Amino acid sequence: MKTINKANNFISRREFLKLSSLGIISFPFVNKNSLVSNQEFPDYDTLGRNCTGGIALVRSRPDVNSTIVKEVYEDTVFPWIREVSAENVDLNHFIQRWVETPEGFVYSPTLQPVKNLPNSVMNSIPDGKAGFWAEVTIPFVDLYLDNPPARSPAIKHLVDNGFPVRLYYSQVMWIDQIRVGNSGNIIYRVNENEKHGYGYGDVFLAAGEAFRPIQEEEIAPISPEMDPAEKTIRINLTYQTLSCFEGEKEVYFCRVTTGGGEFATPTGEFVTWRKSISIHMAAGTVDAGYDTPGVSWSTFFVGTGVAIHSTFWHNQFGEKRSHGCVNCKPEDAKWIFRWTTPSVSLNESDVSWSDWQQGSTRVIVEERLF
């Protein structure tokens, strides 16, 4: 577990739990019949959410050695004024970027870039459909467990310790019911069932305005006319980059976060074998693993479960920190998801295949020492 220091600028969830148990932190009771998105988020175009899982530090200058102005808890949301370079190089990190906020400077990897875009709600599931995919478009939305007790180890951990259960900006979830609350507000039921996330069986209720229904054209294939054999993804573990090639031409580039140490992303040549709009990923224990719903735009290329996917729990792209997967910004993961073959539709949202002749995309993972 991480502890507070100049290098990482946050304390652990365990320490956060201690504060909560002492009554220093409290969370409002959520009534499932009156769910509304009543969080007060700053009125600013781009926002930054503390995504450390603990306490982040606000400093007087973009410098790890500058004065600490304040400490802020997990999910605190700031106006994101601009991103700036560090005044002095921090040798502990490759990333030298800080976010300027009205209260001071926050180390960029600890803030998820988000927006606050509430939506017009749907009053019913579209005719002939079992549900619809929807993206969270506000910094976060609180959930209410509709079928207690909690089944997911992570959700049980949160509920048992009095933490709020939340979804975060950019997560994509399956909505299979729409209800009307006591005050006339619209409530969506979130369900990671088979083909729609493969969760533990937990079902949640959430304020409808937090979710934007995804349209088919958003996931339309990119360059579908291109021979699949001409498409190649190159992931450079040394530089933490990903490039998409059509023949010899690079058509997309982004920074990524891969695994390191015992969780190193495997090197070699692979092919995409599964794609899922959203999937629940879990391994290990609460303290030494992960249990994450709604991991969106996942493109699997190693049979052990290694995937290129969207990430909302850090902004540390350019440094190794994953459990082996290739973490991308949501917009990057979505583009790659659409470009790789075969294509996926909203109706057939989780597809697996094994035959190269079906048109898989080649993925080359390599180290470069120069």
Image: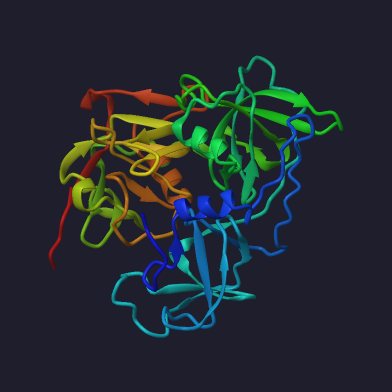
Of residues 69 and 180, the one drawn nearer to the viewer in this rendering? 69
* Residue extending furthest toward the front: 22
The reply to whether residue 44 is visible in this rendering is yes
x, y percentage for residue 277?
A: 46, 33
- Displayed quadrant of residue 289: top left
Residue displayed at 47% across by 62% down? 110
Q: Residue 173's quadrant in the figure? A: top right
Q: Residue at x 39, y 51 (%)?
A: 328
| Rendered position, 212 above or below 49 | above
Quadrant location of the N terminus?
Answer: bottom left
Q: Give the vertical position of 184 relative to 36 (above or below).
A: above
Q: Residue at x 33, y 62 (%)?
A: 318
Viewer-closest of 285 and 294: 285
Above or below for 149 versus 302:
above
Residue 338 in percent (x, y) is at 42, 39
Q: Residue 277, can we see it?
A: no
> How many numbered marks are there?
0
The percent position of residue 29, horizontal first and vertical second, equals 72, 40
Q: Nearer the viewer, residue 260 or 117?
A: 260
Q: Residue furthest right?
A: 183
Identify whether 95 is placed above or below 154.
below
**Quadrant of the drawing holding the C terminus:** bottom left
Specify whether 145 is left or right of 315: right
273 relative position to 115: left or right = left
Q: Image check: 278 left or right of 116?
A: left
Residue at 25% over, 62% down: 239
Q: Nearer the viewer, residue 211 or 54?
A: 54
Question: Residue 32's spot in the image, x, y percent?
Answer: 73, 30
Quarter assignment of residue 121: top right
Colour mode of the rendering: rainbow
